[in-house]
Amino acid sequence: MAAPAIRLRGGRVLFEGTALFDGIALDLPAGRTTCLLGPSGVGKSSLLRVVAGLLAPEPGATLAADDGMPLAGRIAYMAQTDLLLPWLDVLANATLGARLRRDPAAHAAARQRAAGLLQEVGLGERLAARPATLSGGMRQRVALVRTLVEDRPVVLMDEPFGALDAISRLQLQDLAARLLAGRTVLLVTHDPLEAARMGHRIHVMAGAPATLDAALELPAAPPRDVADPMVLATQAELLRRLAEATAA
Ligand SMILES: Nc1ncnc2c1ncn2[C@@H]1O[C@H](COP(=O)(O)OP(=O)(O)OP(=O)(O)O)[C@@H](O)[C@H]1O
């Protein structure tokens, strides 16, 4: 399945009569990772949920893929909370999508792929563990694997590495960047370094109603080295934009 470009125009979301954003335009280029930063509560998750089809914008908005095909069925979504089912073990949680679709061949393939990925994220010994026995960072790894196992051309992720320690975060960014290559990705993050390592384009969302600034475009392929001067300069520029957004 080829990864489409996605275009949102006129996105407008109201909560209790107040516009969170009003007339927002967002372009997700095909096969590229777009990162979204912004102060807490500005509306990043809500915008991601609009693209995921989980939050309906007010009438008049258009959300479409450039190939004219429906987006439904082509998206993997990783929410801010891990949404692991407490009664299923790690492997069953990681393959939940395939399990729910009741296709035995696809389920077997997903289990094999998930077992390999769980090994890569350091959970190879915990396949039979229940979520309650895992740390927050471990649970987040399972949720990340579940998202990657879905193998969709469009991937929407809400702070996927938030609960991880600094080194695990870099390692999982590397793994995710490798597995997300060629997909159309929207990644919400609070971490400017993460955006500078992972994003082909980066937006800062700010204001009330919120708007998006002109995207920063980065040329080299992710994941970029933490010590790359371009990464460090991008991080500094993003911190500057975030400080401005927070002061506004
Ligand atoms: N279903 C809802 N009903 C009412 N208000 C909501 C709902 N969902 C979100 N909001 C409000 O909309 C605002 C934006 O929330 P959102 O989660 O999109 O922000 P965010 O930028 O992702 O924040 P954070 O960085 O803290 O995760 C918040 O004030 C939140 O309380």
Image: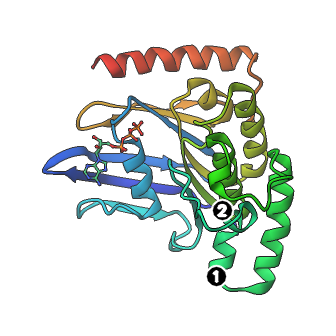
Q: Residues within 10 Å of mark 2 (few under 14, many from 20)?
A: many
Q: Amino acid at mark 1?
A: Arg
Disc 2 designates what residue?
153
Q: Is residue 41 above or below residue 118?
A: above
| Horizontal and vertical percent position of residue 39 | 38, 28
Q: Quadrant of residue 151?
A: bottom right
Q: Amino acid at mark 2?
A: Pro
Residue at 64% in and 82% down = 101
Is label 1 in a helix, a strand or a loop? Answer: loop
| Horizontal and vertical percent position of residue 23 | 27, 48
Front-most of residues 146 and 123: 123
Whichever of callouts 1 and 2 sits on the residue coming sooner in the sequence is 1
Extreme-left residue of the structure: 17
| Horizontal and vertical percent position of residue 25 | 37, 47
Tell me the tag on residue 173.
none
User: Is residue 220 visible in this depiction of the protein?
Assistant: no
Front-most of residues 62 and 80: 80
User: Is residue 161 visible in this depiction of the protein?
Assistant: yes
Q: Quadrant of residue 8?
A: bottom left
Q: Looking at the figure, which quarter contains the N terminus?
A: bottom right
| Horizontal and vertical percent position of residue 237 | 52, 16
Tell me the tag on residue 101.
1
